[in-house]
Image (cartoon, grey):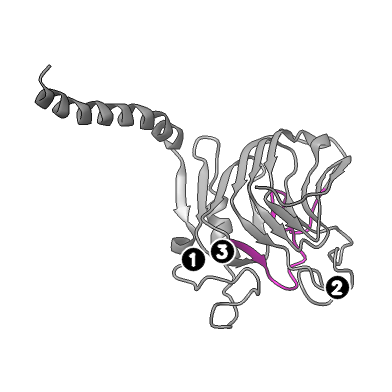
Amino acid sequence: MKPSSLGTLIPILVAAVFIALMQPLCAADKGVNTAYASQLTAGHPPCNLSTGRTASGTACVDDTEVLNAFLSKATESSPVRLIQDMGSLVTGLKLPTSGHVTIECSGWDDGYFVAPGSNAHVIRNVPAPDGYSVSGTPGPAGSNVQIKDCRINGNRGNGATGNANSGDARKSPKGNWLFGIYLDNLQHVRLLHNWIYDAPATGSMLPVSRSTRTVFMSMVRQTRSEFRITGATLPMTASP
């Protein structure tokens, strides 16, 4: 083969290999309903996840309703993928009990700050903002929930300020503990490289006694809290 022919053939081979490698990835995304938080929130200024204010110091706009409206569309045949490309003020994100949701943040300035007085888990898959249950017989388990690369500020105050205003910084007025992430009765859960800070009670709660199975966790950092699976408490430290 002439050198000139080889030079022409190599780019073609490289392109063919690239296409072959990309096909499984494209197939995996087929049917997934994807949206960016910055588009859903119609230009709301990003919320600083350390202060709960905008960069100019003004109050952040509550993004809960529009984000939850998108997440609620998730089904087994049409999963949703929320690209959280900004900081958002929320009063509690609600995932469908059936699952089929991916929340993927774009960087450490992207994620969620729970508003004062929310009395809510930051992210949950149960109806009530502060709800949870680790007793009784669960219904059919949901599946396929992934939360990755997010910064989640639970805004723990002193019981009068912050997420909880019940007089106890860890609990809602109903006496329920408040978590950074609360996921109940799910299979195939992945929590990857999240930084959960200042959760009122515990960073994350996954009741394995209610069919939470195939859980993969890789936390970057949980501060002023701990990771908890029902029946076991695992203190978290920073990791690569």
**Which residues are drawn in magenta?**
109-132
Q: Which numbered marker is on residue 159?
A: 2
When the figure is inspected, residue 37 is found, relative to residue 47, above or below; the finding is above
Q: Residue at x 85, y 73 (%)?
A: 159
Residue 41 numbered mark, or none: 1
Residue at far front of view: 3
Pointer 3: what residue? Answer: 109
Name the amino acid type tagged 1.
Thr
Q: Is residue 145 magenta?
A: no
Query: In the picture, residue 114 is in which quadrant?
Result: bottom right
Q: Is residue 102 left or right of residue 177?
A: left
Q: How many marks?
A: 3
Q: Does residue 55 appear in this view?
A: yes
Provide the secondary structure element on which disc 2 rests: loop
Tag 2: residue type? Answer: Gly
In the drawing, does residue 11 fall left or right of residue 86? Answer: left
Distance Cα–Cα, label 2 vs label 1: 30 Å
- The amino acid type, in three-letter code, at marker 3 is Asp
Secondary structure of the residue carrying numbered label 1: loop
Q: Earlier in the sequence, mark 2 or mark 3?
A: 3
